[in-house]
């Protein structure tokens, strides 16, 4: 079943271009999202939404964090994101017209389901689920569903589920944005960029051998730092989560601007620092954060896009990935981090597909 691949995780990383195409199939034309493909009641609902509350766990929570940037930027609708295990145990102030959005690969995560069940009686406008398993509890209990077409995900560390969640969230955001003044021309531009993503992912997968070579620098380390800014901060979090869960190396993610507020004290030559640096309006700020790391002897691993003109220098390893519209950069920047953690884990000899202490579907609290 793993075919040519040594682990399910590697196979699933390589499936991403295809499953993203599958998730787009029948839902977007060359230039726009087909609203009716999001459900028959979608059109009526989308015009009513004044706020979006996203609830999820783990990797799915990171997808939700990216979506918050998208929803606020493109649709101009306020959005909050919270982990389900926190959301369900506190009191909420619910604005009128709030959409409750859950994200889950399995559709059976206990905390996410419990949050949805609470939300049902709490006065939300409607419940939308983004989910990968047809017929799961989350799908059955939501008003509206956008299925991700990632296919079964066997590796415990989530990879293709995450990028298909981002794909579904992006389509949803565009549909919502259209009801809130996003110009048709901008939608067409973004949809064109979205259609390029699978091919660009294939180019990134071609860097596999080079990323494997980089991974050697992590094998004997005990700690690492992942930095990102804006919508790439959740991608840094996701990269850190992947490294923790399969290689058992302590990895912490920080918004790059927070570095000087504490974590910089940790940086030395034993603490590799990983960052994703697409060319966007935060690039110059990120670069100066990276200087701060270099000045303390930290070794840098930078995944930059080909418009940044960043190159290798002493203590700085730069790997170039294709450029996309800055808003879609989270989709591409995820892949090199998945490959990095995979290769570190393989070199360490851990059980990549079944990491210790973890279960694929967390159906208990
Ligand atoms: C990380 C991972 C977990 C899940 C989390 C939520 O690689 O797999 O963090 O993302 O348990 O699971 P779902 O998406 O099934 O609700």
Image (spheres, helix red, strand yellow):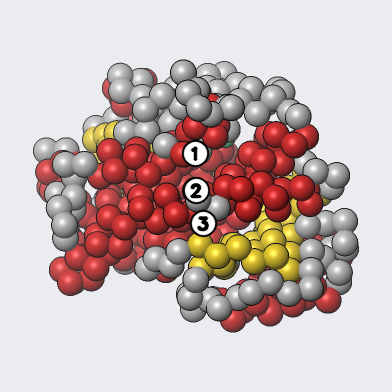
Rendered image quadrant of residue 75: bottom left
The answer to which of 143 and 269 lies nearer the viewer is: 269
3 versus 293 height, above or below? above
Local SS, label 2:
helix
Q: Is residue 199 left or right of residue 84?
A: left
Q: Is residue 76 left or right of residue 327?
A: left
Residue 187: image x %, image y %? 22, 65
24 versus 290 height, above or below? above
In space, the residues marked 2 and 3 are separated at their CA atoms by 11 Å
First reached walking from the N terminus: tag 1 or tag 3: 1
Looking at the image, can residue 52 be seen?
no
Using a 10 Å C-alpha cutoff, classify the residue at mark 1 as few (fewer than 14 neighbours), some (14 to 19) or many (20 or more). many
In space, the residues marked 2 and 1 are separated at their CA atoms by 8 Å
Tag 1 residue: 13
In space, the residues marked 1 and 3 are separated at their CA atoms by 13 Å
Residue 335: image x %, image y %? 52, 49
Using a 10 Å C-alpha cutoff, classify the residue at mark 2 as few (fewer than 14 neighbours), some (14 to 19) or many (20 or more). some
Residue 319: image x %, image y %? 60, 63
Point 11% across, 38% down: residue: 40
First reached walking from the N terminus: tag 2 or tag 3: 2
Residue 341: image x %, image y %? 65, 43
Rendered image quadrant of residue 269: bottom right
Local SS, label 3:
helix
140 versus 229 height, above or below? above
Using a 10 Å C-alpha cutoff, classify the residue at mark 3 as few (fewer than 14 neighbours), some (14 to 19) or many (20 or more). many
Q: Are marks 2 and 1 in contact (CB under 8 Å)?
A: yes
Tag 2 residue: 205
Point 64% across, 74% down: residue: 311
The answer to which of 36 and 83 lies nearer the viewer is: 36
Looking at the image, can residue 295 be seen?
yes
Tag 3 residue: 333
């Amino acid at each position: 079943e793993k075919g040519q691949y040594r682990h399910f995780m590697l196979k699933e990383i390589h499936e991403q271009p295809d499953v993203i195409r599958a998730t787009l199939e029948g839902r977007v034309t060359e230039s726009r999202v087909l609203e009716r493909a999001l459900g028959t009641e979608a059109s009526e609902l989308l015009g009513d939404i004044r706020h979006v509350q996203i609830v999820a766990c783990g990797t799915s929570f990171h997808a939700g964090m990216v979506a918050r940037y998208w929803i606020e930027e493109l649709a101009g609708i306020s959005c909050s994101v919270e982990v389900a295990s926190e959301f369900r145990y506190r009191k909420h102030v619910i604005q009128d017209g709030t959409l409750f959005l859950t994200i889950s690969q399995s559709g059976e995560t206990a905390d996410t389901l419990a949050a949805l069940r609470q939300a049902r009686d709490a006065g939300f406008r409607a419940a939308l689920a983004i989910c990968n398993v047809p017929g799961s509890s989350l799908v059955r209990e939501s008003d509206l569903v956008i299925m991700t077409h990632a296919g079964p995900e066997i590796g415990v560390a989530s990879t293709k589920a995450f990028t298909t969640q981002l794909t579904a969230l992006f389509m949803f955001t565009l549909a919502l944005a259209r009801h809130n003044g996003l110009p048709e021309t901008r939608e067409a531009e973004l949809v064109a960029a979205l259609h390029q993503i699978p091919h660009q992912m294939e180019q990134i997968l071609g860097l596999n051998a080079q990323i494997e070579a980089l991974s050697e620098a992590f094998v004997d380390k005990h700690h690492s730092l992942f930095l990102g800014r804006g919508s790439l901060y959740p991608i840094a979090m996701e990269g850190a989560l992947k490294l923790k869960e399969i290689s058992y190396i302590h990895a912490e993610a920080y918004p790059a601007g927070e570095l000087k507020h504490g974590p910089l004290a940790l940086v030395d030559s034993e603490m590799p620092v990983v960052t994703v640096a697409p060319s966007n309006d935060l690039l110059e700020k990120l670069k100066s954060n990276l200087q701060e790391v270099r000045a303390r002897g930290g070794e840098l691993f930078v995944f930059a896009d080909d418009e940044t003109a960043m190159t290798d220098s002493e203590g700085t390893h730069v790997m170039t990935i294709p450029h996309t519209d800055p808003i879609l950069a989270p989709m591409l920047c995820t892949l090199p981090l998945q490959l990095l953690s995979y290769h570190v884990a393989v070199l360490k000899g851990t059980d990549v597909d079944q990491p210790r202490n973890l279960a694929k579907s967390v159906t208990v609290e």
